[in-house]
Image (tube, rainbow, N blue to C red):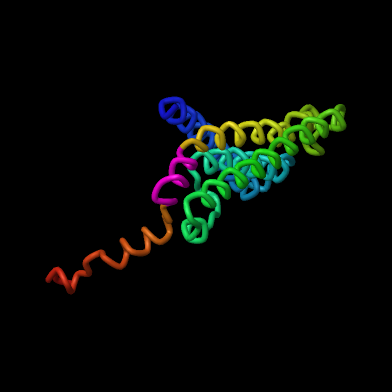
Amino acid sequence: MHAIRRIYDRILEVIAALLMAGLTVIIVLGFVFRTLGISLVWYDEVASIGLCWLTYYGSALAALRGAHIGFPGIVNAFPPGLRVAATIFSELVVLAFFGILAVTGYEVLDILQGDTLVSLPSVSLVVTQSVIPITAVLIIIAELLRFPDDLAAARGAGFEDHELKEALETLNEPTPASTGAAR
């Protein structure tokens, strides 16, 4: 399962990196052409869609890594049995939400048949909005891949509070004055 998760992580990471690179190219091109007085008519619309795609695919990657907002301190305060129940309940709510989003997103694609981008009439809105059901499914897969580890953490010592860990590491870092380093 961990090998599949690593491969999935890498795939999502590559997609997010490619989207970031593509968005960067589009923004730079838009800036250069606007500076030259030859504005690209499609720049704003395509850049906005690119940012949405990056957000959605990045969210799938964040879901796989468990990097969304959570409350590990509160959940860890529960006794193990309640921690497990809260983890299962939370997972079911997330899966239900993204299941509904996937189905509804797919239904919206049917409604958008025939509509196109304003600035690029050759690009269908079905293509641009397909990110919603696709990434909803990707997030469901990410949640299912991460769930066994979450359940094990709930049954065990609890969830690691990454923000607290990072803050404590920052506090414990030696300062130049304490190490005798010159300024």
* Segment tinted magenta in the rendering: 149-159
Residue at 68% across / 34% down in the picture?
131
Residue at the location (52% across, 34% down)? 18
Q: Position of residue 169 (x, y in %)?
A: 31, 61
- Whether 125 is drawn above or below 158: the answer is above
* The quarter of the displayed image where residue 96 is located: top right
| Res 29 quadrant in image | top right
Q: Residue at x 14, y 71 (%)?
A: 182
Percent across and percent down for residue 72 are 49, 56
In the image, is residue 152 part of the stretch drawn in magenta? yes
Between 26 and 100, which is closer to the camera in this rendering? 100
On the rendered structure, is 35 left or right of 1? right
Residue nearest the viewer, comparing 101 with 34: 101
Q: Tell me where residue 172 appears, x and y as whole percent.
A: 26, 65
Which residue is at 72% across, 34% downward?
A: 102
Q: Is residue 3 magenta?
A: no
Name the side, left or right, on which 146 lies relative to 179. Answer: right
**Quarter the C terminus occupies:** bottom left
**Residue 166 in picture, x, y percent from top left:** 37, 59
Quadrant into which the N terminus falls:
top left
Name the side, left or right, on which 29 lies relative to 168. right
Find residue 170 and report its image quarter. bottom left
Query: In this view of the protein, which residue sits in the foreground, 134 or 150?
Result: 150
* Number of residue marks: 0
Does 104 sit above or below residue 85?
Answer: above
* In-image side of 171 versus 72 (left or right): left
Question: What secondary structure do most residues of the magenta stretch adopt?
Answer: helix
Task: Point out the residue furthest to the left here.
Answer: 180
